[in-house]
Amino acid sequence: VKLSFILNGQSRETDIEPGLLLVDVIRELGLTGTKEACGVGVCGLCTVLVDGLPVSSCLYLAACAAGAEVWTVEGLAREEPALIRAFVENEGMQCGICTPGQVMAAAALARERPDASEAEIREQMAGNLCRCTGYQTIAASVRSYLATR
Amino acid sequence: LLPAELDFCAPATLNEALTELAGDDVIAMGGGTSVGLLLKNDLIEPRKIVWLAKIPELREVTAGPAGELVIGATVTLREMACSDVIGREYPALAYAAAQVGNPRVRAVATLGGALAHSDARQDVPPILYALKARVRIAGPASPAAPASRREVPVAGFHTGFMETALAEGELITHVVIPAVHGRRAAYARFTPGSDDDYPTVSAAASITRGEDQRVTSAVLALGGVGPVPLLVPEAARLAGTVPGPREIEAVAGAAEAAADPSGDQRGSARYKKAMAREWTARVLRACLDPGGASLRKRDWLITCEWYDLMPRLVIKHISSRSQP
């Protein structure tokens, strides 16, 4: 079936199998920043925004994105480099595996609650797992980015 | 990863959805967090998925003629947690919805899906049991009649692990929560692991009291202690009393005795039974607290602060997916 949606601000139309997941479609379109890790909606690495809300693209049927606005880490890096820079400057990553999902979760929060409190930052970012940096510098990265907006 | 031959449709009306649901191996989907997991684990092999999120009737939160709250089946858990009417009138329900998984799950997972999945470790069913909610179900049209409708108590809707009272071709349209004057409810989840994990045990209670402070009605439901949410009928013995520690302990003991959990990585069966006792006592005390102090004050305040400041759910009609 034909899938029409807006990907990182550009209208896209692509042929998909109805059973395909959004993460697979995005990656087949060449945007490999979004990665599938746990595959069950727990780790947050595959986080993208669908109509402004963070979703796990590893559980989200691509067909459900018809007509929706989807943002991935590539679009975020282009439109909001300050958020990426905040993670670099605050050492909000170590190995970097989880970072594409961390920054998308942070983008969802910034979009919705630009004046988020510390508790809100931690509540939002709690759904994205990191196994090496520790969460203090991730929270610091988000806090620092929000402070500059 | 998913079956290539899968068919998908997103009907715009309930009747269209019922037509699409007719036949074998068709599954209704709300947000897809449960259906997606089941598909990926080869636990279901549907030939067609019917996505219900585009049906306006199922996306509404309305008040019924007797003041009852009517929540559409594809209202998301996030929308329930954000809703000012649910937060004001049924804070324990808003709280339970806010405990599920993580923000990504709550953004898409729906109330109907949480019920239809029928996993007793989920946060939302026990509080619906405690609030004596009812489930509205629509079934297939016949040549002579339009879609059939029926309404069943949520207690009894779950018939086993991943089994419900839904018949072939039926779907959940709404959940109805009766308005009861003077009722207080509480939900608590206990997990020794991370907050986004399933609870080891969860407990939900509602208590209604008269002006003389005597209990007129009490309901207790437990999650995570069996294949379906467990109603503990001994809670009704609180009726007529002004419960003190002894009465609470008696119900807690009955909860421990009735709980029949399996041991797993979230705790041994014995441990879960002991936790069923402890958290029963806590939710009962929360319902009885005349000052209205909340059960887990710190967590509840954080939850309130977070969700209260978020954009509001449109009560009458939620435009699909762009709100809130």
Image (cartoon, helix red, strand yellow):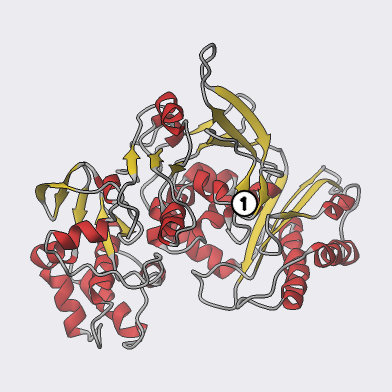
Density class for disc 1 (Cα within 10 Å; few <14, some 14-19, many ≥20) is many
Residue in the picture at 51% in, 14% down: B143
Q: Could you tell me residue B312's position as x and y percent? A: 39, 45
Taking the image as shown, residue B115 lies to the left or right of residue A80, namely right
When the figure is inspected, residue B71 is found, relative to residue B106, above or below; the finding is above
Taking the image as shown, residue B300 lies to the left or right of residue B11, namely right
Examine the image and state in which quarter residue B1 appears: bottom left
Q: Name the foreground residue: B97 vs A62.
A: A62
Q: Give me the chain letter of mark 1.
A: B
Q: Could you tell me residue B21's position as x and y percent? A: 45, 33
Amino acid bearing label 1: Pro
Q: Could you tell me residue B13's position as x and y percent? A: 39, 26
When the figure is inspected, residue B150 is found, relative to residue A146, above or below; the finding is above
Q: Name the foreground residue: A136 vs A146.
A: A136
Picture quarter with the C terminus of chain A: bottom left
Q: Secondary structure at mark 1?
A: helix
Examine the image and state in which quarter residue B253 appears: bottom right
Q: Is residue A114 visible?
A: no
Residue in the picture at 77% in, 65% down: B260
Residue designated by label 1 = B125
Examine the image and state in which quarter residue A85 appears: bottom left
Taking the image as shown, residue A49 lies to the left or right of residue B170, namely left
Residue in the picture at 16% in, 46% down: A15
Q: Is residue B186 visible?
A: yes
Q: Could you tell me residue A120's position as x and y percent? A: 39, 67
